[in-house]
Amino acid sequence: MPDQELETNRDLVNIKNWLCKQPHLPHDVDEVLLKRFILSCGYSIERAKRSLDLFFTIRSNAPELFCMRDPWSQEIRRAFEVTDLIPLPRTTKENYKVFLYRLSNPDMDLFSFVDVVKAFFMLADTRLTEEDEIPAGEIPIFDSANVSLKFIPKINLSVLRKYMIYTQEALPIRLKQVHVINAPAYISKIHAICKPFIKAEVAKMIKFHEPNSDTLYKDIPQELLPAEYGGKVGTIAEIKRFWIKRIEAKRDWFLSADKRWAVDESLRPSTGHDERVNNIRDLPGSFRSLALD
């Protein structure tokens, strides 16, 4: 709609002007990313400003996830080898983007929680800065078929919390549904670890689907899924290869983004900032000593 496009462009100018007046925030920000913040915040400029600040602040306070991101490094390549992190090509009739996340290799000795989260955010950055078509919502599907109890000691509590805050409160997306398919009986143990970090409105979206069930198709048409799930959008390997090539083509951007998108806390104004910004530091370490029933 022309009126909406006009409103978006006007808001874009306002956000750019605001950014230039924030001494602690980066000013060189992709225009398509700013548009995403405007749309995902329902055209509320104040909400978009707060989300942008949180977006960059979390990134600057999580160097283990947002620095030294070389797509050619052994760590990142292995992360993509042992997991399938793929946006699917077609959207739903509501224009919702569907994603599939799964462990492709059940060998937990090859799995690094930090490296996989880092790789996931590299994929997200590629989408956020390059895709002009902004979906009306997003639907992740987590396939837990290869997830065993050995996954639990691999979880890093600090990284999990940053991941949860960042994906729920800072990423410019509109989450519409969350599906966990092939859920084993012990999925409740893993869910219990994540539960303290899941916002109430997100928790209501989560649906668990038992192995070999077709309940997912009530929400997601089967034809939108990869061939391995009886769908018509190509194989997982084909889709994955497409996205890895896009990420590798963006290598120079990744190697400079940690500096370009850094927050300078020494220049942050002393008033008017979001209290959530203060809640992402001094986080505890890992779950290695956590006692589980």
Image (cartoon, rainbow, N blue to C red):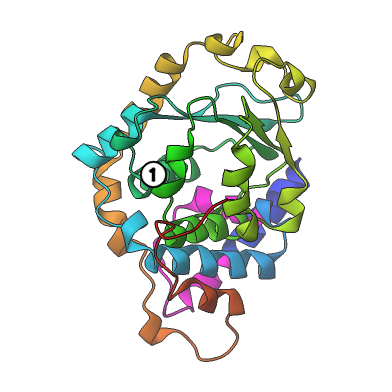
Instruction: Indicate whether 154 appears above or below 209.
Output: below
Q: Position of residue 103 (x, y in %)?
A: 44, 29
Judging by the rendered image, the residue that carries numbered circle 1 is: 122
Q: Which amino acid type is shown beneath numbered disc 1?
A: Met
Q: Position of residue 149 (x, y in %)?
A: 48, 38
Magenta segment's dominant SS is: helix
Q: Is 30 inside the magenta-drawn segment?
A: yes
Q: Is 283 inside the magenta-drawn segment?
A: no
Q: Position of residue 79 (x, y in %)?
A: 33, 36
- Residue at 49%, 79% in the rendered image: 21
Q: Is residue 130 visible?
A: no
Closer to the camera, 6 or 31? Answer: 31
Instruction: Indicate whether 85 appears above or below 251.
Output: above
Label 1 neighbour load within 10 Å: few <14, some 14-19, many 20+: many
Instruction: Indicate whether 222 appears above or below 122.
Output: above
Range covered by the magenta-colored residues: 15-39
